[in-house]
Image: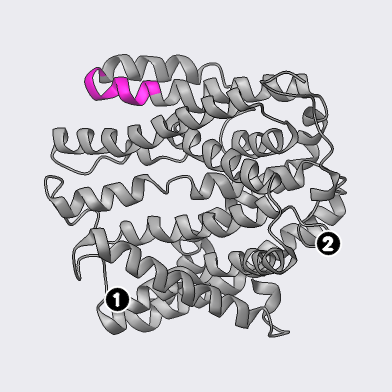
Amino acid sequence: MTDEVSDVKDNTHATTLESSNHRTVYFDVLRIIAICAVVVVHVSAQNFLKSGVDTPEWQALNFYDSIVRWGVPVFVMISGALFLQGEHRIEKLYRKNIARILVAFIFWSMLYAVKNMIFTDCSWKDTLKQFLLGHYHMWFLFMIVGLYIIVPLVKPIVKSMELTKYFLLLSFVFTFVIPQTVKLVSLKYPSIASLANGMLGKVYFHFTLGYVSLFVCGYYLNKVDLGKRMRAVIYVLSICGFLVTIVGTSMLSVSGQKANVMLYDYLTVNVMLEAVGIFVLMKDIFERKAVGVRIEKVLGLLAKYSFGAYLVHILVLDELVRIFGLNTLSFYPAFSIPVISVIVIVISFVISAVLNHIPLLKKTV
């Protein structure tokens, strides 16, 4: 084995988090911290467009939002690590995995739509539209279903490490580098960017685009054993990703005198580097360190409740504002964001845990 990347290792014990007696602890840890990151993103976004970009308050919002952009990408990477190994028959994929997402969507989308109708007095037509589209954070369910659907098509690719690397290379270039470069060029030279987009559009290249790149990346990072030097490189690049997100967003926003979220996009090089760094770090720590049976059990339970926590956390956040008037500008954001985030996270996990013990509702979380 070289110090860079070894051959594929055997991770068959990680085929599924729910059915295996031997849990992959770092998957559980990643799930838990990813939902916490998503909560911080949504808390930080509360007054993001209301504060002036030159104010310390806005800079605090930008800081917290920037350092947790990796939450959703990490969720996608975990899904790829799990679903692209082992055997998944198409029938079971639809009957079990996709059906579960559909049930959860129907329940939670209806809940959010009805709540919105009650408290905003919107029409039945608007309520039905919101139900069909889902609350804004439920876009994730649509995206995950899309990835599940193509699992049988991607699996033959990842069986070959050479094809997997080629797929990731194409994804890196066409999903991350080129689109982000064109967007940055458009800030100064919109005509050149428009020309570049026109040329790229004529290629009709879609195969490795979108979140499937992170899906395959998660599988790859789970399968390979990275040497110390490679991990060090990844950590340095990840730190650079965080700095680019924080400083770059601040500079773009201040120069334009309005919030510019170009670097917040989950499919940007900087956010992708953040996500890869977090994924590799957790794998490095928890694959090489035993946590004990009791802690492993607790982590497993929290990971199990993370999906429900994701679905309910916006409801909790909204109710804190509606009932208590608590939001990120209630006091200085540098302190309000972590305080509110902790409150939302704790309540969301408690609600998810309760729902998981109610027979008629546990399938919705």
Q: Amino acid at mark 1?
A: Val
Count of numbered labels shown in the rendering: 2
Magenta region includes residue 188: yes
> What secondary structure is the magenta-colored segment mainly?
helix
Tell me where residue 53 appears, x and y as whole percent.
Answer: 15, 46
| Secondary structure at numbered mark 2 | loop
Mark 2 and mark 1: span between their CA atoms?
39 Å
Asked if residue 51 lies left or right of residue 363, the reply is left
Q: Please identify, in this view, whether the residue under mark 2 or under mark 1 is nearer the observer.
A: 2
Part of the protein shown in magenta: 181-189
* Disc 1 residue crowd, few under 14, some 14–19, many 20+, Cα 10 Å: some
Residue 42 is left or right of residue 295, and the answer is left
Read off the residue under disc 2. 19
Foreground: 318 or 198? 318
Query: Could you say which is closer to the camera, residue 123 or residue 179?
Result: 179
> Where does label 1 land, which residue?
321
Q: Is residue 105 above or below residue 85?
A: below
Question: Can the viewer see residue 184?
Answer: yes
236 vs 2, left or right, is left
- Quick one: 82 or 21, which is closer to the camera? 21
Q: Residue at x 61, y 56 (%)?
A: 29
Picture coordinates of residue 145 (x, y %)?
Answer: 66, 52
Q: Where is 296 relative to 67, above or below?
A: below
Three-letter code, disc 2:
Ser
- Image point (70%, 44%), residue name: 288
Q: Secondary structure at mark 1?
A: helix
- Which quarter shows the C terminus? bottom right
Where residue 342 sits: x, y (%)?
A: 41, 69
